[in-house]
Amino acid sequence: MATEGAARAYVLGMAGKTCDRGTAEDEARGTAPETACAAGRTPPARAAARRTVAVERLGPGDHACLWFGAQEERWALRAAFATGGLVRGERVMLFTGPGTAEAETLDRLASLGVPVGGGRVEVVREEPGYVPGRGFDPAARMAYWERAAEDASARGFTGLRLAGDMGWASEPDVDRGELAAYEVALTTALAELGTTALCEYDRAGPDREPILAAHPLDVPPAPGTLHERRSGDVLLLAGDADRADRPAFERAVRRPGLAAVDLTGLAFVDAYSVRVLLGTGLRLRCTAGQARLLALCGAADGIVEVRTG
């Protein structure tokens, strides 16, 4: 398969066998990978610029981070994530850790409308690659995902979808730098495997930024809500743009200094919100499906930019 030997390659990379030069800015700061290797340090983890997307928008190859707070919101996101996989015909595996019983997991998901009967959702209580007292083995964890993906394919599933409680990562025998480097490497492995992964980290846990930066995607903390973030003169939206969030939506898209709105992170946008967007005159970055809705609502030529990535 395309990722054969990925676990071995990961070990070599982390041992300093493969080091690129990095950027000029990295070299000036002494943080370029080859500089770190020469000094005997683990190269700093680097990931692509992060985007926020609705959990319903996650698909094959996506690697997202969930910083959860309230347990009710966490379970709602798990349910939406699992449902998305079942609709696609994927093998769905939820890694809840030893503290949550399988029956409790299935009961909670069922109460949120997930069709868990017939073993369609697998609940796994082990923590691949981590043994208390012995620490974290990134290569073993990577190899576990490879085997799970191979098994999913052999059993006729269209793909593999994983959600994992990362509570073990806060234990004192887990090196946070090594963990962040593993998360960066995992992004490439998931893309090659066509596997979707959602890593669940407690919002109250330590060292949030390095772990968040190691993920290319993150999801809003609750499904069905609107999330906004500004990057220069571009407004990035995620979640749902509907009647429940109209005041916040209108305030966001009418802020001064904006040149474009990125809609690709939205799972849902209603016709009213589209009309508001068209009235702003801003450029609109969107998916192919969103572009069709914009065209039906009278979007002018030249303001719509379809994104496929």
Image: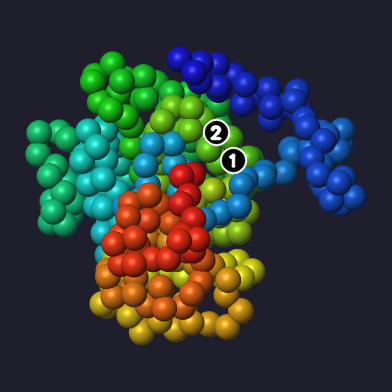
The answer to whether residue 242 is above or below residue 291 is below
Q: Position of residue 211 (x, y in %)?
A: 57, 52
Do callouts 2 and 1 mark residues in contact (Cβ within 8 Å)? yes
Please give the name of the residue rendered at 22% of the width and 33% of the height, measured from the top-left corner.
89
Amino acid at dot 2: Thr
Q: Nearer the viewer, residue 43 or 20?
A: 20
Asked whether residue 306 is in view, the answer is: yes
Please give the name of the residue rendered at 45% of the width and 61% of the height, measured from the top-left corner.
301
Q: Position of residue 76 (x, y in %)?
A: 26, 59
Q: Position of residue 28 (x, y in %)?
A: 90, 50
Point out which mark residue 184 bears: 1
* Quadrant of residue 128 within the rendered picture: top left
Please give the name of the residue rendered at 20% of the width and 41% of the height, measured from the top-left corner.
87
Asked whether residue 172 is in view, the answer is: no
The answer to whether residue 117 is above or below residue 3 is below
Given the current orientation, which residue lies at the most extreme front position? Answer: 301
Please give the name of the residue rendered at 58% of the width and 35% of the height, measured from the top-left corner.
185
Q: Label 2 neighbourhood size at 10 Å, few (<14), some (14-19), many (20+)?
A: some
Q: Nearer the viewer, residue 86 or 137?
A: 86
Residue 164 falls left or right of residue 191: left
